């Protein structure tokens, strides 16, 4: 039988990406690359005011602009029953086009459809809107007073959206009071934006039979299909959502945006395909922002550093609508991970969210729904505690880590951490970076008055949304799915309900299937993003693809293998029980010479299957029993220029433990990218509003994306603690570096300034802030 | 984002460009590198009805070194950056700035003269031209005239170029072998305008005293700021650490920035001082003087 | 207005509005969608193409009219006779891309860079690529890729 000895394992191999040949040749297939006969372009009219009544909209001039075909307004949509969109976690709804009033600057007011991009823009400019400005609520603390009611459309006549809490408040308060040491710090995780380089956009097209083909930049195409059906009333079988290549998402392409609904309505009403591609300004000012959490963090500890209690009270700014793309059952998502890597005997976390006259959102920017905020709070808080105790922050962490033997570890706020070895990961990091030598260098520099800082972050992530007990979107549970078909010649096609936006699924999915089935990953085609062909899934975000779709895929492959085993038994002329899967082949137990490869079995499945069911395919839906809990130890080394406040990140080491690694090259790339986003958040990115509610960061000249020159050189390493409940032990990695790194950067800067008495600096840590912190600290010292 | 519609005229020569501008008057704008104009048009903040494109006018695409350095109207930033003389000590101010204007790709199209005509208070070239005591060659109805840079830079986004006129060139006087400069810029990231920047040009006498200094700031007021107090302080003096500090302090004092996303007023004033001092130290170091 | 632009060796004669940006001319009039648009402020560099052989320009900050009579090279023109350009090969080998949206611009800026500086240091590569943003890779691997391509091109200059 088989003489093939060349079959190799595919897991853990740094295989070059299968999707790359098209991207490097300009043959990608992004939404804006699509064109259809008769296609119109849509442009949106947006509000210049953050809060205003709409006294009237006059479209007559716009209709005279050459090339303009139609204009729709909120009134038109309302009349059609399409005035509002449900938000994903079901706590609120959002206007599609402004109805009666606008609630944030750049809110969508009217949609213009025209023969060209230019004509659409000309038409949008010609729409006359009469606004009566209203008082503006630009921050959640003003909102809290309820002096101006922003959302009279809601039943509850308050700007307060929700209160959420977890943990034991009384016990935590008592423990804090009784603690020998206690720190308290207000920390603001600023409003930032994922800003993928490809903006959001869509093409809506109805075919001759009236079926909608909706091409869209979506991280979750099946969810879009269901949502579009629910909003528009179009039966779901008449909707075909196609998410082609996506130029980065980072959470920005999870929500359904008003522009999408307008494009569909326009295409239906006019009977021609409609393309809408937002501008960078539209992307930054109206699509999902992230964070904007004002957190009061308190930690209690014994004098020896043993932590005794954690309390975090948060005021959240959700903007004009609570459009948080949070699929968990908790309004503050996974914020309960705030106890981090440490064994707190008691903890309490609460979040109160408010409406303001700002863009809606609250999406998980490379984050599992508020995990980044939580990780920042605890990792910054631990450093402040170390400072208060006069203890090395490394020592404080070691002392309080959950120990290896405590896993599965039930956290006091309700999670069961699957696995981890925090001490080991930290030790690897300390050794690799040369911590002792750095401490020595720092002491020498401090003696000379130079400002050098070392920042540590030893975070625990919670990813893999998610178990149905914790998650749903519009009621849909957050399982994921995979389908495998093996062709007669031993190649195959794989489809999942996830959707890559650069993560490399076409490669890693092929590797998983190849590993499980002993096939060549080069001949496993991966297809995602087409709701007509892919099994229902909830998409890609929150590092969920590997923990959910990846798991489903491994399990589907094992189903294929079980079916193949029957055919192998037929080919080997033995009973099924006598066939074992070894060295990526089926062989007769104890007789390695008698074997068949999967390729041979695949051919037989179509040509010589005996009494077995023909064909070789399987589908698997997977509702994970638990989240996965990646962790890491990150160390940043910075030098601060006293005169200019400039911070130079001299070194940054990320040691990640994401469980089993499918493709180390891709994992490293994900870490590099996430660190760069974390770096940007820590040092330069913020969506700011002035007190009048004007957005100040409306394009890339003011919302800053670091270039190759500012970005540090990244160093990476790994430890591997497999997830016990994932079929291949993988945990997911995409967001760890973004979640874990901001605290490391800020801790490093504060450490550099700590000899001056500086204890905290808010992000983004700009040169101006650093310079002022130094100046103020020195002035204070001069006085005392 | 798509600009409002406009008419496009391609100039075949400098004469042709000038004639078209004369004819079209205030509705027309010269299109040189376009790296500030085109984004402004895309946002419809600028909406000229006619663009007169001078990119194809070969006679304006030159860099000549004939004692003075003269850059034609469409000499690109990148051409300056790559010029063979750029490594010479006397041109160190120009060398420095040519590497930090906008970003490397924008510099392929962006022009020095265009940048000066744009006169953005946060731009790089206006401060450099002030420090280097450049002059502009402007063509008007009465023929060509030469305008000292201090008179050319009138106010934010306003220059001495009148309606129907065009700037043909910028001329930097030849530095002697005891002249060096430095451009010090703090920006939030590559491609950003300066949070603060200092252009410094120093000429020494044979005895090591300062024969003359040109010092100017970007992002320090409605227009690039010549730090006359610092120039006066330095003149005739032997540069010392104290003198350099005093020059920096004069710059901080004369700097009159606005608070914006790049920083507070006090921070920018501080930076102006720090950067002038650093620039002076670097320029002097280039002349072999440690201070 | 009429423009005539040679793109990747093919002459395109088209009637366009003067306000047509070169990036949209390439994408929509020539059907070469490899050149992307990611911003309106010439910040991101997704649209970079090479003009007249060695000049990297941002095609969203230039009108098609300005390219009339010029030669443009886009990402689609890099591979020759079915063989990847050494830069393309290097971006693939070094995992210099993830979502792929910035990649064409990165490749074209790198192409012009290597024409001017055939053997750049890592620092010079970082300086020269600073007009191109990437949100995915963190640039480490892009720098490695450009260095690999430089080495390949230097070893076999004929493949330029």
Image (cartoon, coloured by chain):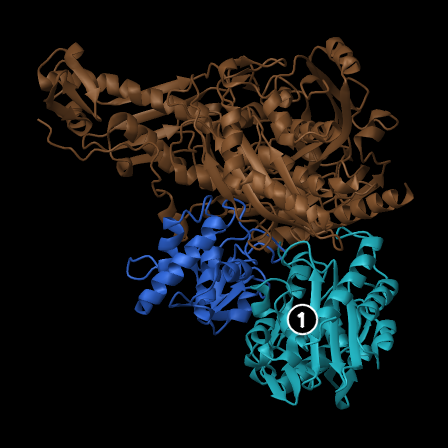
Q: Quadrant of the N terminus of chain A?
A: top left
Residue drawn at point x = 86 percent, y = 67 percent:
B250
Q: Colour of chain A?
A: brown
Q: What crowding class fits label 1: few (fewer than 14 Cα within 10 Å), some (14-19), or many (20 or more)?
A: many
Is A46 placed left or right of A620 in the picture?
A: right
Q: Nearer the viewer, residue C74 or A663?
A: A663
Q: Colour of chain C?
A: blue
Is B24 placed left or right of A139 in the picture?
A: left
User: Pointer 1: what residue?
Assistant: B50
Residue B79 visible in image: yes
Residue lying farthest right?
A783
Q: How many marks?
A: 1
What is the x, y in percent for residue A99? 74, 32
What is the x, y in percent for residue A76? 67, 34
Question: Residue C158, relative to residue A467: is it above or below?
Answer: below
What is the x, y in percent for residue A19? 37, 43
The image quarter containing residue B224 is bottom right
Residue drawn at point x = 75 percent, y = 78 percent:
B202
Q: Colour of chain B?
A: cyan
Which chain hosts label 1? B
The image quarter containing residue B45 is bottom right
Residue drawn at point x = 83 percent, y = 29 percent:
A141
* Secondary element at image label 1: strand
Q: Nearer the viewer, residue A149 or B232?
A: B232
Q: Quadrant of the C terminus of chain A?
A: top right
What is the x, y in percent for residue A760? 75, 36
Question: Residue A781, relative to residue B166: is it above or below?
Answer: above
Q: Nearer the viewer, residue A75 or A230?
A: A230
Residue A533 visible in image: no
Q: Nearer the viewer, residue B245 or B164?
A: B245
């Amino acid at each position: 039988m088989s003489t093939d000895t060349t079959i190799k394992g595919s897991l853990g191999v740094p295989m070059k990406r299968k999707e790359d040949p098209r991207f490097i040749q300009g043959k990608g297939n992004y939404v804006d690359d699509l064109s259809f006969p008769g296609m119109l372009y849509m442009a949106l009219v947006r509000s210049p005011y953050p809060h205003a009544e709409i006294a009237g909209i006059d479209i007559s001039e716009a209709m005279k602009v050459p090339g303009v075909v139609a204009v729709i307004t909120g009134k038109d949509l309302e009349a059609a029953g399409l005035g509002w969109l449900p938000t994903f976690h079901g706590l609120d709804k959002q206007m599609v086009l402004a109805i009666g009033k606008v609630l944030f600057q750049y809110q969508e007011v009217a949609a213009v459809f025209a023969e060209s991009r230019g004509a659409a823009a000309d038409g949008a400019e010609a729409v006359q809107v009469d606004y009566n400005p209203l008082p503006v609520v630009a921050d959640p603390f003003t909102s809290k007073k309820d002096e101006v009611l922003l959302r009279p459309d809601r039943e509850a006549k308050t700007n307060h959206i929700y209160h959420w809490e977890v943990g034991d408040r009384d016990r935590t308060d008592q423990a804090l009071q009784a603690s020998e040491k206690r720190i308290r710090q207000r920390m603001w995780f600023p409003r930032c934006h994922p800003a993928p380089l490809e903006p959001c956009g869509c093409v809506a097209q109805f075919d001759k039979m009236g079926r909608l083909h909706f091409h869209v930049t979506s991280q979750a195409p099946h969810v879009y299909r269901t949502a579009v059906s629910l909003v528009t009333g179009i039966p779901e079988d008449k909707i075909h959502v196609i998410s082609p290549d996506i130029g980065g998402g980072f959470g920005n392409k999870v929500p359904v945006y008003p522009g999408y609904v307008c494009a569909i309505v326009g295409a239906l009403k006019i009977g021609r395909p409609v393309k809408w591609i937002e501008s960078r300004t539209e992307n930054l000012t109206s699509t999902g922002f992230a964070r904007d959490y004002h957190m009061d963090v308190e930690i209690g500890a014994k004098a020896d550093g043993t932590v005794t209690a954690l309390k975090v009270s948060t005021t959240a700014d959700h903007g004009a609508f609570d459009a948080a793309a949070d699929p968990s059952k908790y309004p503050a998502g996974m914020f309960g991970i705030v106890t981090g890597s440490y064994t707190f005997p008691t903890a309490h976390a609460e979040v109160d969210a408010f409406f303001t006259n700002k863009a809606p959102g609250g999406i998980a920017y490379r984050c599992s729904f508020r995990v980044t905020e939580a990780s920042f709070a605890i990792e910054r808080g631990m450093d402040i505690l170390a400072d208060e105790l006069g203890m090395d922050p490394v020592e404080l962490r070691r002392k309080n880590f959950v120990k290896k033997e405590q896993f599965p570890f039930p956290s006091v706020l309700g999670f069961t951490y699957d696995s981890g070895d925090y001490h080991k990961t930290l030790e690897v990091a300390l050794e690799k970076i040369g911590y002792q030598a750095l401490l020595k260098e720092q002491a020498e520099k401090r003696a000379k008055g130079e400002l050098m800082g070392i920042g540590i972050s030893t975070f625990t992530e919670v990813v893999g949304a998610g178990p149905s007990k914790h998650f749903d979107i519009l009621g849909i549970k957050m399982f994921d799915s995979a389908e495998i078909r093996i062709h007669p010649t031993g190649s195959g096609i794989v489809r999942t309900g996830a959707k890559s936006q650069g993560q490399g699924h076409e490669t890693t999915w092929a590797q998983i299937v190849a590993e499980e089935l002993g096939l060549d990953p080069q001949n496993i085609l991966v297809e995602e993003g087409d709701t007509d062909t892919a099994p229902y899934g909830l998409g890609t975000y929150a590092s969920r693809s590997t923990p959910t779709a990846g798991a489903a895929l491994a399990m589907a492959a094992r189903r294929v293998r079980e079916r193949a085993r029957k055919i192998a038994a037929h080919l080997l002329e033995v009973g099924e029980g006598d066939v074992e899967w070894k060295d990526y082949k089926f062989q007769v137990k104890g007789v390695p010479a008698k074997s068949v490869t999967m390729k041979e079995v695949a051919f037989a499945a179509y040509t010589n299957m005996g009494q077995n069911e023909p064909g070789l395919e399987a589908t698997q839906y997977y509702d994970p029993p638990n989240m996965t809990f990646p962790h890491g130890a990150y160390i940043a080394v910075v030098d601060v220029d006293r005169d200019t406040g400039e911070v130079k990140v001299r070194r940054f080491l990320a040691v990640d433990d994401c469980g089993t690694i499918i493709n180390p090259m891709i994992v490293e790339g994900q870490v590099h990218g996430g660190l760069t986003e974390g770096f940007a958040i820590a040092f330069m990115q913020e969506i700011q509003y002035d007190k009048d509610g004007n957005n100040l960061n409306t394009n890339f000249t003011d919302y800053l994306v670091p270039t190759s020159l500012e970005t540090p050189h990244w160093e990476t390493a790994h430890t591997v603690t497999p997830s016990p409940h994932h079929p291949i032990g993988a945990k997911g990695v995409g967001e760890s570096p973004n979640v874990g790194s901001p605290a490391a950067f800020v801790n490093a800067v504060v450490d550099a300034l700590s000899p001056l008495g500086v204890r905290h600096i808010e992000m983004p840590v700009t040169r101006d802030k650093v310079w002022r912190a130094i100046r103020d600290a020195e002035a204070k010292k001069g006085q005392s | 984002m798509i600009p409002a519609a406009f008419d496009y005229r391609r100039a075949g020569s400098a004469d042709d460009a000038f004639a078209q501008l004369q004819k079209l008057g205030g509705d027309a704008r010269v299109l040189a590198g376009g790296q500030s104009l085109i984004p402004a048009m895309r946002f419809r903040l600028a909406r000229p009805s006619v663009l007169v494109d001078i990119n194809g006018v070969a006679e304006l695409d030159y860099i000549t070194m004939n004692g003075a350095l003269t850059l034609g109207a469409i000499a690109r930033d990148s051409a300056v950056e790559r010029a063979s003389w750029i490594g010479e000590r006397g041109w160190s101010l120009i060398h420095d700035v040519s590497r930090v204007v906008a970003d490397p790709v924008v510099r392929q199209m962006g022009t020095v003269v265009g940048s000066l005509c744009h006169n953005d208070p946060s731009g790089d070239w206006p401060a450099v031209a002030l420090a280097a005591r450049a002059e502009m060659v402007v063509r008007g109805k009465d023929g060509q005239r030469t305008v000292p840079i201090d008179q050319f830079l009138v106010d934010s986004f306003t220059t001495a170029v009148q309606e129907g006129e065009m700037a043909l060139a910028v001329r930097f006087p030849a530095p002697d072998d005891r002249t060096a400069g430095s451009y010090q810029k703090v920006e939030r990231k590559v491609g950003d305008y300066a949070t603060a920047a200092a252009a410094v040009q120093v000429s020494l006498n044979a005895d090591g005293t300062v024969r003359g200094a040109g010092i100017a700031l970007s992002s320090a007021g409605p227009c690039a700021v010549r730090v006359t107090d610092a120039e006066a302080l330095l003149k005739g003096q032997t540069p010392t650490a104290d003198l350099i500090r005093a020059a920096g302090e004069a710059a901080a004092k004369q700097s009159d920035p606005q608070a914006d996303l790049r920083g507070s007023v006090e921070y920018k004033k501080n930076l102006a001082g720090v950067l002038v001092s650093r620039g002076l130290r670097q320029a002097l170091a280039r002349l072999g003087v440690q201070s | 207005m009429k423009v005539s632009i040679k793109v990747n060796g093919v002459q395109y004669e088209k009637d366009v509005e003067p306000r047509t940006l070169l990036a949209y001319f390439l994408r929509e009039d020539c059907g070469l969608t490899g050149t992307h648009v990611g911003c309106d402020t010439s910040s991101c560099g997704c649209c970079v193409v090479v003009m007249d052989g060695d000049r990297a320009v941002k095609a969203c900050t230039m009108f098609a009219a300005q390219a009339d009579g010029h030669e443009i090279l886009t990402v689609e023109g890099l591979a020759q006779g079915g063989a990847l350009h050494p830069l393309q090969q290097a971006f693939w080998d070094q995992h210099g891309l993830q979502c792929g949206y910035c990649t064409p611009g990165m490749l074209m800026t790198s192409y012009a860079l290597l024409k001017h500086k055939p053997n750049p240091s890592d620092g010079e590569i970082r300086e020269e690529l600073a007009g191109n943003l990437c949100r995915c890779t963190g640039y480490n691997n892009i720098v490695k890729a450009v260095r690999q391509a430089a080495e390949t091109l230097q070893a076999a200059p004929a493949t330029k």
